[in-house]
Amino acid sequence: MDILSIIGVILGFAALIGGNFIEGGTLQSLINGPAALIVIGGTVGAALLQTPWSQLRRALEVFPWVFKPPANMFQDGLSRVVRWSVAARKEGLLGLETIAETEKDPFARKGLQLLVDGSEPESIRRVMETELVIQEQRDLDSVRFYESMGGYSPTIGIIGAVMGLIHVMRNLADPNELGPGIAIAFVATIYGVAFANLFLLPVANKLKMCVHEQAQYREMIIEGIIAIAEGENPRSIEMKLNGYLP
């Protein structure tokens, strides 16, 4: 569990609510159902309009990374690559066939299968780098779902505020209703800006960092498999890949 993400969400909204209390406001003044419906519903609707189903599904799959990022696999991956290189030295590349069949990581398994098939190092690199780039781009495209909501939310909030002001204008004959009505109208703007800047945009940026880390891990696996294909000794491979460790 990423404690910083939890602290960030709590601290951000606590600062907003706490500042409201310090200025003499109440929690009730920040609660407005119609404004929440306009901002959240409008933001999600606009984002869904631009997002294909495959990207939406992936966006929902990676969302938990915000609070529980993928485990740091670099050290484990480096150890596995070294074991593969030792096995290749002792038994030859065909000795990796059994290891490839039991490998859980699909990306690493593909690389091992290419090794077992006797593919040339450059051919292995082209195949694996192509898959790396495609997977990274797919993940970044899915993250744009949250990024786009962060862009739409403030604008939808302004629309909600204008709609509230329209209703306020109907009560111009009653001055007692103007102040509270205007305050409620601008709650939608607060919702839109806060939703974007305290949640949606930080979520998108956090997911981008996770995607970047996943890509670096796959780059390490590629370099390790290429080194095995070129016949480098295990100690040399370990020293080369140490640079990928955080």
Image (tube, rainbow, N blue to C red):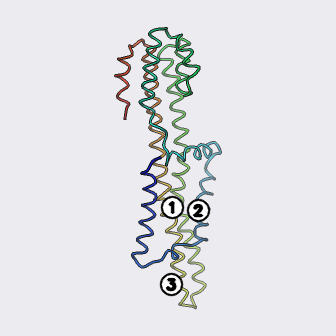
The disc labelled 2 sits on which kind of residue?
A: Ile
Q: Nearer the viewer, residue 201 or 89?
A: 89
Q: Which residue is mark 2?
A: 40
Give the image location of residue 59, x and y in percent: 57, 46
Q: Are marks 3 and 1 in contact (CB under 8 Å)?
A: no
Q: CA distance from mark 2 to mark 1?
A: 8 Å
Lateral position of residue 82 relative to residue 192, left or right? left
Q: In which image quadrant can residue 117 be found?
A: top right
The disc labelled 3 sits on which kind of residue?
A: Gly
Element class at badge 3: helix
Q: Residue at x 55, y 72 (%)?
A: 31
Q: Residue at x 57, y 76 (%)?
A: 164
Q: Nearer the viewer, residue 147 or 85?
A: 85
Element class at badge 2: helix
Q: Which residue is mark 1?
A: 195
Q: Earlier in the sequence, mark 2 or mark 1?
A: 2
Classify mark 3: residues with Cα within 10 Å, few (<14), some (14-19) or many (20+): few
